[in-house]
Each structure stands twice: as structure tokens, then as C-alpha cells.
Amino acid sequence: MKLKLVIMQIMFRRSQLPIITLFIALAAACSSGTSGTGPNTNTAAAETPKPAVTPSGQFTDADIAKLKWLEGSWKGTGGEKPFFERIRFDGSTMIVEVFADESMKKTDETSRFELKDGEFGNTVNDQRSAASSITDTSVQFVPAAALPGGVVKGSTFRFERLDDGTWNAVLVIPATSSRPSTEKAYKMEPFNPGSK
């Protein structure tokens, strides 16, 4: 797992993936239960399994409108170096753009969270994360199947609005037989690219 995390950190530094893509990739690496040195013979059978949280299929345009506080340009910190994103809404679609640097002139990647058949989510390759809850101050995403009847792969993460106009993006790293579940938070602050 350490090797996979190092690889993901290198990939993130080089490509400046959007926070969503980073979350999906990190969660997949962490939940695989491997160390990079061979098969994992430990099992979590001794642990009491928690009921899985599943995506909601009941969201409406009104629910997505509750997330308008995410709109804007943001500087993210909490990793090795800052990253820069812009979030905007087009109807019930949330568009997340990540930029190469603080000038926010060159878009490196764009992710789209779309509301379809009551489910609000984003798919990256064969992994999908979809919202399980939306409130006026938070949204939580959990793993979902990328294709109907497909394998559920993805990550659990949430965006939490704070009173000072910032918000936290929190990645939940699942427990394994050798360690408890942990969380990694990234602070997102309003950013004006013309202010530097």
C-alpha cells in the first residue's frame, strides 16, 4: 500500500489531478489491502463489518442547488503543495476544473458530477463515486458501480462548508486488518488568480 500511495502522490504532483480524481485513486490504493510486497494474507474477518453506505437515487435539482456554496475559484492546501480549482454549475451538473498553477489560465483536467435518474455522481475510468447525502453545508460521496450491475469501486469523501467561507474536502481511507480507518482533510480557500 505504501508503494501505491507514493505512486499516487507522484502522479498528483505531476498532473495536479482534481481533488475528486485524487480521492478516487487514493481510496482505491488504500482499500486494496496490499503493501506492494506480495499478496496480503491478513483478513478483516475479526472486525465487525459496518453497514455499507450506498448512493441515494432520490436527489432532485433542488438538492443540487444546495451545493451552490461550492461555486468559485479555490486554493487547496493540506498536501505537499497547493492546488487550484474552479467549481461551477450548469443546471444540475457540477463542473470541477483543475489548473496547472495559480494563474488559473491552463486547465489540466475537468470532472463532471451529473444528476441522472436521481443519482448525483462522477465516474473516472471504472470507478464511480456518487452522493449518499446532501445538506445545505455538506455533501458525502460513496463508492458506486460505474456500469449497471458492475463492481462497486470508488472512494468515500465529503465536502464540508465552514462558517468562514472556506470548506474542507475530506478523504476517508478505509480500515484494513492492520490499521483503523483514517481521514485526510484538504482546506479549500477562496482564491482570486488576479490577486498575485
Image: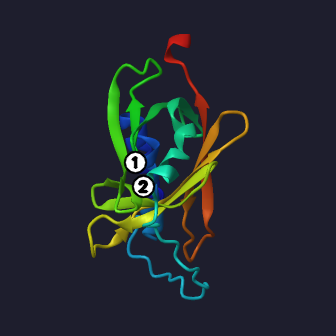
The kind of residue tagged 1 is Thr
Up/down of 167 relative to 75, above or below: below
Q: How many marks?
A: 2
The local crowd at label 1, few if under 14, some if 14 to 19, many if 20 or more residues have their Cα within 10 Å, is: many
Q: Which residue lies under the disc numbered 2?
A: 24
- Quarter of the image for residue 14 reads top left
Please give the label number shown on residue 61: none
Camera-side residue: 11 or 95?
95
Residue 7 appearing in the image: yes
- Quarter of the image for residue 188 reads top right
Q: Determine the secondary structure under disc 2.
A: helix
The reply to whether dot 1 and dot 2 touch (C-beta < 8 Å) is yes
Q: Residue at x 30, y 64 (%)?
A: 146
Up/down of 47 relative to 113, above or below: below
Q: Which residue lies under the disc numbered 1?
A: 21
Residue 16 appearing in the image: no
- The single residue placed furthest to the right in the displayed view is 163
Camera-side residue: 65 or 77?
65
Q: Residue at x 38, y 72 (%)?
A: 38
The local crowd at label 2, few if under 14, some if 14 to 19, many if 20 or more residues have their Cα within 10 Å, is: many
Q: Where is residue 136 in the image (x, y as percent from the top left)?
A: 62, 49
Q: Residue at x 52, y 72 (%)?
A: 53
The kind of residue tagged 2 is Ile
Label 1, label 2: how many angstroms apart (C-alpha)? 5 Å
